[in-house]
Image (cartoon, helix red, strand yellow):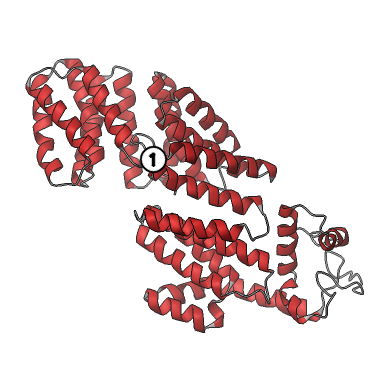
Amino acid sequence: MSENKLDRDRLIRLQRGELAPAEVRETIRDLLAAGGGTAADEPRGAWPFEATVKPDAATPSGWGAPPAAALEQHRLETEAERLPELFAELTRRPLAQQRLLVCKDARFQSWQLCEMLLERSWQAGFDDPMLALELAEIAVSVAYELHARSIPEMLLYDLKARAWSYLGNARRISSDLHGAEKAFELAESLVDRGSGDPLEQGRILELQASLDLDRRRLEKAERRLSQASVLYRRAEAFHRHGRTLISRGRICGRSERIDEAIELLREGLSLIDAEQERRMVLVGVHNLCFYLNERGDHEEALRLLGEARQLHRELANRLDLIRLRWLEGRIALGAGRLDDAEAALSEVRAQFVEQEIGYEAALVSLDLAGVYARQGRAQEMRRLAEEMIPIFRSRELSREVMAAWIVFQNAARMESASVGLIDELSSLLKASRSSEAPGPLGPTR
């Protein structure tokens, strides 16, 4: 917090209702940090500031803090220091015991602990969906144990809305799409009663858009992201605005609006704060390379991918790295380097088969079939088609996937599987996918 955060003019404007919603939220947060959390214990008129308080040269802001505020500030600082310990004590227990502790033990009824649980839930969403779900559920419990006596009611509604939206996102990642819808409905109703902070509203819209994508509601997802962009621009939150542009670029790519996708991805990357969210940079660059290659700009895609290799090494998980290798194979295929393409695509196919990811295995197999078709290797195509049959039989794949593969299998047997047919089947499979398109890096959660 800057030294002059709580200037008298801003506090007077707060009382008069002259601040914009974002300024209201920022001012209230500063008051909480400076001791405003004890407002309910003060005489009427003493909050947000006491008119008789005189400047204190010993304090950087020039305002003396009343004893209660100083004690509250000390409590908040102590709580922040103990957060890791409290988090560990809470989360090492079974979920039912965690709920009981939050209800009975005031130590766990903490705004800061709730925010830590939400942040850890977000991080867990990349690798451990069930952990993300549990952490979000406990965060909701903590949010409902906080009381308006110590925190302004509008901020409590904001926090509850955020907690429900994170729970909705965790449910989405865990494939509970119906439960996610219900959680987002609650988040919407709560944020409408909050401070009006555009950052909170935009965050919920972003997460809802991810659910819309999983539901194949591309137009609705794009509309929500556009609304979030407006809110972020209004709040001068340029990093978050960049996030929404990258997400919109991915939607355009899935809708085969390749030029628009590339334009949005470039603009989004120019706004992203790389230090704040490096993974978003990775996602943006990877997707940009994918769509440049789709447009035929193979050399530019390869150059950008080389520049992002360090990011992949530092941030990518195992599946990300497989997708990186897949993209390298597709770029090589587009550029006519068929030997390089075959090596990369064969490697990727083997890893998808090993991890039992049938849909992606089918798609990369079609890419590999494209290599064989260009080289006139009918025998290898027949072998590829036969090898995928037991994989498909052992997994629940959509009718579209099964039908497309049967067409390819029959064409391979008759040695009539042309490059054009393979491309058409690949497009059909991509259109049947209910979540993220296979080539670009997966969702940012």
Above or below — where is 143 with respect to 208? below
Quadrant in which the N terminus is drawn: bottom right
Question: Is residue 114 rendered to the left or right of residue 372?
Answer: right
Q: Residue at x 81, y 69 (%)?
A: 48
Identify the element where label 1 is drawn.
loop
Question: Is residue 90 rendered to the left or right of residue 41?
Answer: left
Tally the marks: 1
Q: Position of residue 62 (x, y in %)?
A: 87, 66
Q: Position of residue 102 (x, y in %)?
A: 49, 78
Question: Is residue 368 rendered to the left or right of residue 198?
Answer: left
Q: Residue at x 39, y 20 (%)?
A: 298
For the question of whether residue 308 can be seen, the reply is no
Question: Is residue 171 rendered to the left or right of residue 227?
Answer: left
Q: Residue at x 66, y 54 (%)?
A: 197
Callout 1: few (<14), some (14-19), or many (20+) C-alpha neighbours within 10 Å? some
Q: Position of residue 174 (x, y in %)?
A: 35, 56
Amino acid type, residue under disc 1 in the picture: Arg
Of 55 and 158, nearer the camera is 158
The residue identified by callout 1 is 216
Residue 41 lies in quadrant: bottom right
Q: Residue at x 8, y 33 (%)?
A: 386
Above or below — where is 386 with respect to 411? below
Of 411 and 236, nearer the camera is 411
Of 127 and 415, nearer the camera is 415
Residue 428 lies in quadrant: top left
Above or below — where is 291 with respect to 66? above
For the question of whether residue 332 can be seen, the reply is yes
